[in-house]
Amino acid sequence: GSTCSAMRCGTWWTRGCGRVELGSISHGPAGSDRPLGRVATFVDSAEERLHPFGAEDGSKVEVAMTSEPVPWVKTIVPEGAIDCYVNANPPQGGVSWDRTSHVFGSSQRLAPLDATGLITAMELAGIDRALLGPPPMGSTENPEEGYRWTLDAVQRYPERLKLSVRVDPRDGIAAVRRLESMVRNDGGAALRLVPALVGVPMSDRIYYALYAKCIELDIPVTVTVGMPAARVSSFIQHPRHLDDVCVFWPELTIVSTHGGHPWSDVLVGMMAQWPNLYHMLSAFAPRYYPPELIKYLNSSRGRSKVMFATDFPLMSFERAVQELPSCGISDAAWPNFLRHNAETIFWRST
């Protein structure tokens, strides 16, 4: 029979089937006194039914009880998943998430975490590594303190965290110098850009010196596409702006973020066109992943192009992992999506 592994007390996972709850103790075939294990019940939004874990006759299948719970994602990638988009939310610094509260809910629920707490939360969800960026621009009154906290976390847990550098392109050459310093001296592994917070699209010349420096430093740039959660101009982040960047900077590795909604079909077309363009499915609960991106991920052409991310703390590790099994990703695409693509792009030297 098939076995599944526990992520937390009472909730078990099995590959490709969704969440299963443990019910009453069951027994084996009629006449047998051997306990079989707890009855596993499949749970989804529409119905609750017995799930036989692949048994065509509908018979109950033994659920292995383990002394050390194993998160569901580790049944697919034993090393754990990689989260490509995590935001620092330190206890100090007064980070505010209020401008996105109409989408993600009250910032009061986003409890700050110290570095150890962040690693613990990742471990419970089966997330091995993360690309960690400082708090977003404008979210804290003291951005330097947020940066110091982020650097300290990366230096304390170098095997688990890599630094995603944030700079303001409007600072010109000072931003370029800061990026270079953070990469050469502090282990920066990527540049993180959010055009909606800058006020100009990603194809604007204000970014060009940074793109050139990323090529020189051999690091990727991550760029948010799609309608932003904050109530600012949306068309600044239309994926069509990626076209000019890919044309003019063919050596630049570009990883778009946040789904591209409501222009996800344009984003898929861009990825199919340009070999240096990728995407991470961040800032979406998996149940709401754009279907165009899931279809592309499941294809042979898209399997190496799309990767997992959360946008923590706005999207919690726990919720993302809980909803992943029901989002329609094929068995063949899971390992690349959860880990291997991110290793190729962001962990090139390890």
Image (cartoon, rainbow, N blue to C red):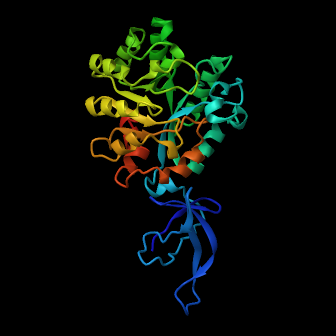
Furthest residue to the bottom?
Answer: 31
Depth order, front residue of 128/72: 72
Give the vertical position of 5 relative to 74 (above or below): below
Where residue 63 sits: x, y (%)? Answer: 54, 71
Where residue 181 sits: x, y (%)? Answer: 48, 16
Where residue 308 sits: x, y (%)? Answer: 45, 41
In the picture, which quadrant includes the C terminus? top left
Furthest residue to the front?
Answer: 46
Residue 318 at least partly seen? yes
Residue 159 at least partly seen? no
Tell me what residue is drawn at x 35 percent, y 38 percent: 344
Give the vertical position of 291 relative to 165 (above or below): below
Where residue 158 sits: x, y (%)? Answer: 52, 35
The total of numbered circles placed on residues is 0
In the picture, which quadrant includes the N terminus? bottom left
Give the vertical position of 105 relative to 149 (above or below): below
Depth order, front residue of 16/56: 56
Depth order, front residue of 269/2: 269
Where, by quadrant of the figure, is residue 320 drawn? top right
Depth order, front residue of 118/97: 97
Where, by quadrant of the figure, is residue 221 drawn? top left
Tell me what residue is drawn at x 57 percent, y 86 percent: 34
Left/right placement of residue 138 relative to residue 74 reads right
Where, by quadrant of the figure, is residue 40 drawn? bottom right
Left/right placement of residue 310 relative to residue 329 reads right
Tell me what residue is drawn at x 39 percent, y 29 percent: 255
